[in-house]
Image (cartoon, grey):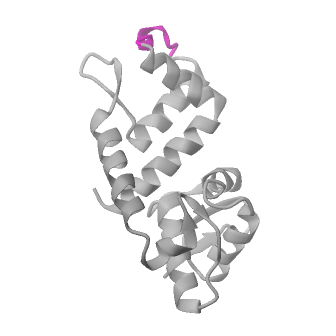
Amino acid sequence: MAENSTTGTWIQVAAGLKNPQMRTVLGQVLAGQAQEIDAQAKANAKALQRWAGIGLLAQDADGSWQVNEQLLADTLASAGAAKADRSGILRFFDGPKLHTLPAKPADRREVLLYLRDAVIAEGQVLREEQLNERLGVFHPDTALIRRYLVDHGLLSRAADGSSYRIGSD
């Protein structure tokens, strides 16, 4: 799995864990109580589908929900490899946290590309609060990072400001 792919995955998992409904549904699956989840309840069905979209949960042939152990293994392996490499743009990060926005335009663009690819996939549309949840893993000033991503053309904002998608590089 590519580093940006797994980086994006763990960011999506962290954002999902921040959502109480998603956390509850995941907890039931992890506790072996998946059969007790009322999948007909709209909130539960939505949470299950969001976890499935991230790739953390998948349905078996019999319809029961299971954790994708391979995704967890790949994500952990990628995190270990990334931690060992503190060169390139990773020198601007302390773990997952962005501690400095680079002054050099080329470095800044690379950092912003990294952040964009970690929080949103091609073709995905995120509401502002979803984007903020994901960017918040990297930096507390989500408005600043979001504005830079839009200003650099890396994200496009809907005319009404309600949603974001990948812009033209």
Residue appearing at x 67%, y 81% in the figure: 151
Foreground of the two, 122 or 91: 91
Where does residue 1 sit, x and y in percent of width and height? 27, 56
Residue appearing at x 55%, y 57% in the figure: 125
Quadrant location of residue 65?
top left
Where does residue 75 sit, x and y in percent of width and height? 36, 48
Quadrant location of residue 41?
top right
Q: Is residue 167 visible?
A: no
71 vs 33: above or below: below
Q: In the image, is 32 to the left or to the right of 23? A: left
147 vs 42: above or below: below
Where does residue 104 sit, x and y in percent of width and height? 59, 91
Residue numbers of the magenta segment: 32-38
Where does residue 78 sit, x and y in percent of width and height? 34, 54
Q: Per the image, is 35 magenta?
A: yes
Foreground of the two, 67 or 40: 67
